[in-house]
Image (cartoon, rainbow, N blue to C red):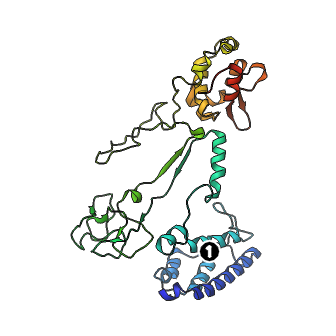
Amino acid sequence: MSDDRAWDSKTFRSLGHAIVDRLTEHLSRSAAGTDPVVRWQPAQENARRFALAANGGADPLELADRILSASVQQSHPRYVGYQVSAPLPVAALFDLVGAVVNAVDDWLSGPQQVAHGFDVDNVKPLRALLSLCHEAGRTVLIVSDHGHTIDESQSFAEKSEHSRWRHPGESPLVEGELLFSGPRVWSPPGAGGVVLPYLSGATYKWKKVGHHGGATLEEVVVPAVFIEPNGGPFPVPHWWQLEAGVSAPVAVATAAPLGETLFAKPVPSGGLSARLVESAAWKERKALLPGRFQEDKLYALLDAMERRPRLSGVEFTEVTGEQERRMAGFASQAGLALNAGGAEVLVFDREARRLVLDVELLGQVFEVDRG
């Protein structure tokens, strides 16, 4: 198909109707069991049949017929799938919508088709996800694909068929370019490296809203956002900030001791437990704790739960060193002293498998101020 026809809306409409008709007939015959589940052919025969299509020489409708006839009939009553189930036909239509719109790349390449922020109002599942994580006291990590450099109408005098890289043999390096080479660097055929611009917004090609490729931070660094429930501070690992020109230390895969991991829950000095032990009511109530109960583990737990009032089994183990199966028993024993007068200060939620601390209620029962 020529480039002109490939982008022609009338051609797309005509082919779309024809292919949907073929898919409808295919679904009908498959569901009725009219055809065999699979028309098996040797790999060599399939390679021969689809060789023309791989080179762009097949008629689109002929290719569609060829694919349908050679595919496993997943809607067939005798089909037994062990990896995938039959797709929902209406869902396939939305795959088509997504493929045509291709929101981010189409926006970058042409008219400003999509111009919105990525927030809880536009990314619909995000608000519900964050609400659940907040309720459960979970830290959220959001990462993305690499970014894009925004076109700032700059261009290099040296042109290339690619917008953000070129062959090193085309011309000497100029200001704004760097040559990258080495065993882990992709190079174009016959080249010993690749030239990439390190200036944002500069391009070798036509103007676009944004570009892929290049060696700017927004193109090679994957953004990561940590969201801590209740707005608490987040422990920052030593590698979180690197100064320009300073080589990062070689990472060694070793098991980090408890308390030095990224999600460690360090016990803050002067936390909830420090205020609790000064309470006259607590000094009286703690005598109800079992004789072998380790108060230091309870205090570590309270300090951690002041920021994270709902604790999972994994977090319970990290903070106390106790096995996860001990959660219910630990809460029951601690509750003998904490849950004065039937108040549910610290309880074990059996359905959610979490420890739950009511910080406000603890403050009322033991006259402890919020930190």
Is residue 277 placed above or below 122 in the rendered structure? above
Residue drawn at 24 percent across, 74 percent down:
170
Is residue 64 placed above or below 280 in the rendered structure? below
Q: Quadrant of residue 12?
A: bottom right
Residue drawn at 52 percent across, 79 percent down:
45
Residue drawn at 63 percent across, 24 percent down:
369
Is 187 left or right of 172, judged from the image as shown? right
Query: Where is residue 120 shown, x and y percent of the image?
Result: 61, 54
Query: Where is residue 105 shown, x and y percent of the image?
Result: 50, 69
Q: Nearer the viewer, residue 62 or 250?
A: 250
* Residue at the left extreme of this rendering: 172
- Residue denoted by label 1: 71
Is 151 left or right of 65, judged from the image as shown? left
Q: Nearer the viewer, residue 59 or 345?
A: 345
Q: Is residue 294 visible?
A: no
Dot 1 falls on a residue whose secondary structure is: loop
